[in-house]
Image (cartoon, helix red, strand yellow):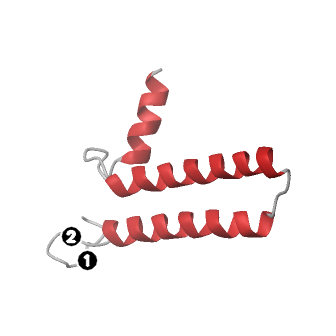
Amino acid sequence: METVKRLFREWFTGKGNESFEIMRALTALCVLVMLVYIGVHLVLNKTFDPLASAGGLGALLFGGGAATAIKDGTKIGGTTTGEDG
């Protein structure tokens, strides 16, 4: 159980694993919703367009990752951080 807590803490917190980041949680939620949508679509329609589904899921992952990377690379004042932080 401790491993699961640590895993979620590392997924949804910032660089120092101290502050919760809403963008990471929203990205995970969007991916989960997209996967449920694909599953429901398969059950109801019995068809699957992997190109459209992969494109949508890829866009969600790219957008969430890019937003998190931009946020992690800047401080509140707008200056970029170095290796020392």
Disc 1 marks a residue whose amino acid type is: Thr
First reached walking from the N terminus: tag 2 or tag 1? 2
Tell me the residue at 48%/49% (across/down): 29
Task: Please provide percent x and percent y for residue 2.
Answer: 44, 23
Residue 70 at x, y = what percent?
Answer: 36, 73
Q: What is the number of the mark on residue 13?
A: none
**Regarding mark 1 in the picture, which secondary structure is present there?**
loop
- The picture places residue 76, in percent across and down from the top left corner, at 17, 69
Dividing the picture into quadrants, the one containing residue 77 is: bottom left
Left or right position of 19 against 29: left
Mark count: 2
CA neighbours of label 1 inside 10 A, class few (<14), some (14 to 19), many (20+):
few
Q: For numbered disc 2, what is the local secondary structure?
A: loop
The residue nearer to you, when weighing 54 against 13, is 54
Q: Mark 2 is on which residue type?
A: Lys
Mark 2 crowd level (few <14, some 14–19, many ≥20, 10 Å Cα): few
The residue identified by callout 2 is: 75
Q: Is residue 27 left or right of residue 16?
A: right
Task: Give the residue displayed 32% in from the left and 68% down from the top.
Answer: 71
> Pointers 2 and 1 in contact (CB under 8 A)?
yes
Say above or below: 64 vs 28. Answer: below
Query: Along the line of sight, which residue is nearer the eye, 23 or 40?
Result: 40
Could you give the CA–CA distance between mark 2 and mark 1, rounded to whole angstroms? 6 Å
Identity of the residue drawn at 60% across and 54% down:
34
Residue at the extreme front: 44
Q: Which quadrant is home to the C terminus? A: bottom left
Q: Which residue is mark 1?
A: 80
Q: Residue furthest bottom?
A: 79
Q: Is residue 66 left or right of residue 43?
A: left
> Whole-percent x and y of residue 35?
64, 50
On screen, residue 30 above or below 52: above
Farthest-out residue, right: 46
